[in-house]
Amino acid sequence: MRISVRITPGSKRNEVVAEGDNRYRVYVTAPPVEGRANEKLIELLAGYFHKPRRAIQIIRGRLGREKIIDIT
């Protein structure tokens, strides 16, 4: 399954919010430095979808706020 994610790093909370068909907004407390926000994103999505972390992969947008995520 592929989903579209808009991430907000440096937020006050860690939260996944569904916005529609395969579209999510994710708030993470981690800063966008050295991949920390991406690591937290993967951790949150793994918990949200009840999948192991290795099942979550960033396909596009590793350096931006808009990302395409593949969940196997």
Image: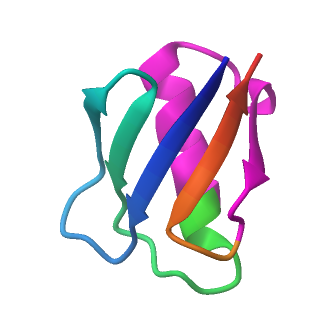
Residue 36 percent across, percent down from the top left: 61, 71
Residue at (70, 83) in percent of width and height:
34
Residue 13 percent across, percent down from the top left: 21, 58
Residue 9 percent across, percent down from the top left: 39, 72
Indicate how the structure is coloured in the image. rainbow
Front residue of 39/60: it is: 60
Residue 64 percent across, percent down from the top left: 59, 74
Residue at (47, 39) in percent of width and height:
44
Residue occupying the far front of the picture = 21
Q: Is residue 40 magenta?
A: yes
Front residue of 4/71: it is: 4
Against 25, residue 60 (above or below) is below
Q: Is residue 60 magenta?
A: yes
Residue at (68, 76) in percent of width and height:
63
Residue at (30, 52) in percent of width and height:
14
Left or right, residue 68 beside residue 27: right
Quadrant assignment for the N terminus: top right
Disc tally is 0
Front residue of 26/60: it is: 60
Left or right, residue 8 beside residue 43: left
On the image, which quarter does residue 24 sit in?
top left
Against 31, residue 4 (above or below) is above
Residue occupying the far left of the picture = 12
Quadrant assignment for the C terminus: top right
Against 1, residue 19 (above or below) is below
| Range shown magenta | 39-62
